Image (cartoon, grey):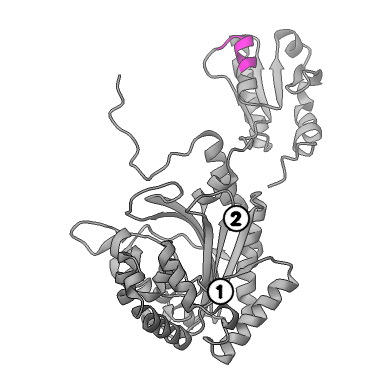
Amino acid sequence: MKNMYSSIRGTSDFDGSDAFLFGKVNLKSKFILKSFGYEEIILPLLEEEGLFAKGVGQGTDIVERQMFKIEGKDIVLRPEGTAQVVRYYLQNSLNKKSDFYKFFYTGAMFRGERPQKGRLRQFHHIGAEAIGSNSFYLDAEIIDLSLKILDSVGLKERKLIINSLGCKKDKDKFIGLLKADLDKRKKYLCEDCHIRLNKNPLRVLDCKNEECRKQIKSFMKIDSYPQDYLCPRCFDDYKNLIGLLDDLSIKYILDPCLVRGLDYYTNTVFEITSLELGAQNAIGAGGRYNGLIKSLGGPDIPAVGFALGVERILLALGSTSLEPALDIFVVVSGRSLEKVGFQIVRELREAGVNADLDFCGKSLKGQMRLAQKKKASFALIIGEQELAQGSVLFKNMVNSQQEKVARSGILDYCEKNIIFGERGRCQC
């Protein structure tokens, strides 16, 4: 029968090892985020359109072209998490309860644009936001935290790119200088940059057009950046942050053209890219958004955060041998032993051992093949003769060695050979 339906272009089904790896990335991320003192919040997928139009920026690609809007209502599927966290913060008047908060979130985001590799309509973010401090030490923590998450999932080949946009006055000054300079050479810019120059001049710095890049380089005096554009305080914070990253042995690339595509960014901005990805090579990004809370009707409170793209991480990790870890597959020699097998599987699971068995009435050989297919470490074989003697057989699926174990000693055997054994099930 022909399948009538397919997944929507720009969305993904996760199954098998992909689903397992997806879960591992989230699990390890949450463990590290909590160890840094960040509190998890779970936020809705739906938000008011105005939250992002005002917070992210009316002239950004997200607002102009990429939001999924519910027909007939001013409601959208969330395109990003930072503005949403600030909405939660203000709605609950958290500024009146404490002067400092650390939050993290995970979940699906949505953007209605033409899908391509690494750029989906539905994607997943792991994000963190720290609200209430303007310390460059907090900037360093946010960067360190994002890199540690990538370390934990085995993503070693990446680049950290960093810049400072300065405070709002610095940023406005820079935008004015950029626009005045590029207006004189507008004829050399692409059509998209003609629009960007009027709506959001900083977006010109993101253009990949070769001629546009040439014009940008002629404007950016790399040797004199950022001292020519930043006020003394912002420049000192930038220098102190760079020095702190050096002290932490965190490698980075300084790029004065890095601006990020959202209006709320000020001061520190950074991006983490992977050498394993193509044109869409950003794994994550973040920075300060000191004016966002005020722009959304709250007090003038500084904040900094980041988001990592889970699908981008999985792409960068590539093919992996990471599989769901099945410790034991229980095999019975006859249908009359199925109840005993079921009881043993339940005992194993309650003890924290990953265990399974056949539910389709397969033969003994069929069950052993299934144990191999599931990549079980051990097969626990229940036979009439062994059970009458009060024992079972453990077969090591790697070296095929068998060992008779007392029925009452099954969990002790597991503790010795599996849970705290060489394979290290306890390791996250």
Residue 15 vs residue 259, the one in the foreground: 259
Q: Which image quadrant for residue 151?
A: bottom right
Q: Is residue 348 left or right of residue 26?
A: right
Q: Which image quadrant for residue 216?
A: bottom left
* Alpha carbon separation for disc pair 1 and 2: 25 Å
Location of mark 1 (residue): 163
Q: Residue at x 42, y 42 (%)?
A: 12
| Residue numbers of the magenta segment | 362-369
Residue 420 vs residue 198, the one in the foreground: 198
Tell me the crowding category of disc 2: few under 14, some 14 to 19, or many 20 or more residues within 10 angstroms, Cα based.
many
Callout 2: SS: helix
Q: Is residue 131 above or below residue 6?
A: below
Question: Which amino acid is tagged 1?
Answer: Asn
Residue 20, magenta (yes or no) = no
Question: Which amino acid is tagged 2?
Answer: Ser
Residue 397, position as x, y percentages in the image: 73, 22
Location of mark 2 (residue): 29
Residue 137 vs residue 285, the one in the foreground: 285
Q: Main secondary structure of the magenta part?
A: helix
The N terminus sits in image quarter:
top left
Whether residue 48 appears in this view of the structure is: no
Q: Residue at x 37, y 50 (%)?
A: 121
Residue 139, position as x, y percentages in the image: 60, 74
Q: Is residue 319 left or right of residue 125?
A: right
Residue 322 is tagged as none
Callout 1: SS: strand
Name which of mark 1 and mark 2 comes first in the sequence.
Answer: 2
Q: Is residue 115 above or below residue 266?
A: above
Q: Residue at x 54, y 87 (%)?
A: 228
Residue 365, magenta (yes or no) = yes
Residue 61, position as x, y percentages in the image: 34, 64
